[in-house]
Image (cartoon, grey):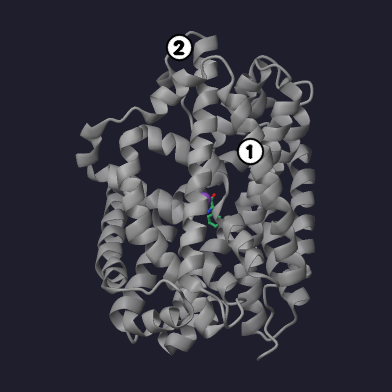
């Protein structure tokens, strides 16, 4: 199979990997997570997690993909026949995420339109829940919401379009457009945010270190959790993307670049979000800690309220939601490519058929989230995936490879054979000991908080 698709350029691969990594996790998850876990002091466990787990795992996933040149299930089956299921597990987690991730992109599309004229009026929360989503009681479905359904279909059309065109002409082109545009838009937003009254108040709250929290195990779990999610690790994504690297590609260097680019964007987002929250706090005479939010609440309830109070509200609202759309789309494409590649190889069908079948099934399932009960269902599924899916797939992955396969030395020599930076004992210790211990502990914490 020497006719395997390949990236056109090294930059193309890097932009695609960054496109997957840089997503909603950077914009709406990192700032609130850092704030709640010690503010400025959170950077210590965060950096530690990046260097002991994030980048080492990224190197491992790039190595697996590059060495075995297959989708996640195929690559694992080449490591050992009995490990194919790990690849399918990761693909399955990605598949589930790909049924609700596009819903959020769809909301952001509508909100970039609502921004002109600030259609959410004076009660942004009420507008989101009652007027826009027409949210039904938990456990009920209700009818389809057209204003979610139509942008959702648009998202799928875009995803189908780029996936259908293949690695170089589709995925690479999409990221070459989306990521530079995202960075430019985001820089404009951050500069604007920093020049708003109250911005420094927000930054002060964000960076003020609470060192007493460092001793708390849950802060470390939060740091590792953020790094895993943010770098798209253990989702089969980075294995799949690395399988399209040409033979002569530096692995280790690429992993460092991806890791630091993602963290830089995360820091930038933290600054932008908190400068904006500082503005809100100063306008409403509240403490910054009272207006902090993350996730859906930050983007669709708090931000609209802030946007309404800004000069040139329409323009900045549009730019903010457009940045969510671009960050989301590039991640969405990467999640869906995991099963497109897996189906293509397992059943020996064309890319077009794999996109139609895999993407088609995910698209149909995504319709469940486009009705009046959508937000409740999304919360439930997302919580489940984050508590179990991610930690478990990471754990399976490192334990299988470090403890049961031929061992890390094999992977190390492959990475070293193509990379400028040579791996050492540190890499094997991070993956063989630190990461499994942290993931195991994380799993137990999640189980405990779920059961108690
Ligand atoms: N890494 C992405 C982010 O930070 C999230 C993501 C997770 C994307 C899983 C794809 C798969 O937002
Ligand atoms: Na990220």
Q: Could you tell me which residue is drawn at 43 percent across and 59 percent down?
A: 390
User: Would you name the residue on which mark 2 appears?
Assistant: 286
Residue 360: x, y in percent?
73, 64
User: Would you name the residue on which mark 1 appears?
Assistant: 186
Residue situated furthest bottom in the rendering: 1
Q: Is residue 129 left or right of residue 408?
A: right
Residue 358: x, y in percent?
68, 69
Can residue 158 be seen from the camera position used here? yes
Can residue 449 be seen from the camera position used here? no
On residue 397, the disc is none
Position of the N terminus by quadrant: bottom right
Q: Could you tell me which residue is drawn at 45 percent across and 74 percent down?
A: 420
Based on the displayed image, in which of its 4 quarters is residue 214 positioned?
top left
SS label for mark 2: loop
Q: Tag count in the figure?
A: 2
Q: Is residue 275 left or right of residue 423?
A: right
SS label for mark 1: helix
Residue situated furthest front in the rendering: 420
Residue 217: x, y in percent?
23, 45
Rendered view: 1 above or below 293:
below
Mark 1: give few (<14), some (14-19) or many (20+) Cα within 10 Å. Answer: many
Rendered view: 403 above or below 89:
below
Based on the displayed image, in which of its 4 quarters is residue 114 positioned?
top right
Of callouts 2 and 1, the N-terminal one: 1
Residue 53: x, y in percent?
35, 60
């Amino acid at each position: 199979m020497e006719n395997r698709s390949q990236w056109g350029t090294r930059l193309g691969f890097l932009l695609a990997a960054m496109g997957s990594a840089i997503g909603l996790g950077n914009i709406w998850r990192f700032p609130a997570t850092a704030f709640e876990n010690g503010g400025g002091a959170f950077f210590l466990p965060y950096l530690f997690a990046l260097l002991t787990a994030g980048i080492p795992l990224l190197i491992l996933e790039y190595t697996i993909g590059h060495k075995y040149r297959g989708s996640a299930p195929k690559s694992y089956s080449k490591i050992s026949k009995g490990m194919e299921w790990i690849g399918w597990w990761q693909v399955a987690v990605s598949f589930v995420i790909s049924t609700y991730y596009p819903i959020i992109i769809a909301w952001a599309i509508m909100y970039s339109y609502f921004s002109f004229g600030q259609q959410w009026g004076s009660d942004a929360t009420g507008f989101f829940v009652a007027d826009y989503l027409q949210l039904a009681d938990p456990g009920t479905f209700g009818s389809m919401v057209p204003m979610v359904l139509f942008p959702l279909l648009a998202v799928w059309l875009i995803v189908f379009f780029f996936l259908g065109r293949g690695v170089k002409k589709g995925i690479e082109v999409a990221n070459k457009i989306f990521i530079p545009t995202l960075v430019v838009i985001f820089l404009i937003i951050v500069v604007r945010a920093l020049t708003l009254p109250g911005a420094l108040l927000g930054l002060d709250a964000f960076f003020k270190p609470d060192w007493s929290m460092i001793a708390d195990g849950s802060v470390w779990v939060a740091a590792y959790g953020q790094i895993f999610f943010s770098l798209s690790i253990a989702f089969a994504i980075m294995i799949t993307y690395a399988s399209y690297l040409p033979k002569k590609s530096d692995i280790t260097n690429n992993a460092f670049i991806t890791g630091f680019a993602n963290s830089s964007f995360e820091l930038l987002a933290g600054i932008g979000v908190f400068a904006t929250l500082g503005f809100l706090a100063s306008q409403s005479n509240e403490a910054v800690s009272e207006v902090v939010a993350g996730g859906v609440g930050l983007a669709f309830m708090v931000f609209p309220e802030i946007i309404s109070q800004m000069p040139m509200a329409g323009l900045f609202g549009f730019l903010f939601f457009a940045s969510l759309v671009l960050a989301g789309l590039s991640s969405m494409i990467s999640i869906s490519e995991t099963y497109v590649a897996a189906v293509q190889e397992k059943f020996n069908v064309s890319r077009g058929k794999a996109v139609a079948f895999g993407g088609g099934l995910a698209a149909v399932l995504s319709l469940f989230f486009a009705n009046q009960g959508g937000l409740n269902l999304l919360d439930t599924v997302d919580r489940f995936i984050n508590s179990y899916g991610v930690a478990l797939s990471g754990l399976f992955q490192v334990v299988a490879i470090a403890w049961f396969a031929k061992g890390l030395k094999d992977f190390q020599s492959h990475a070293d054979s193509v990379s400028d930076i040579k791996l050492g004992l540190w890499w094997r210790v991070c993956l063989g000991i630190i990461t499994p211990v942290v993931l195991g502990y994380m799993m137990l914490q999640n189980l405990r908080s779920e059961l108690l």
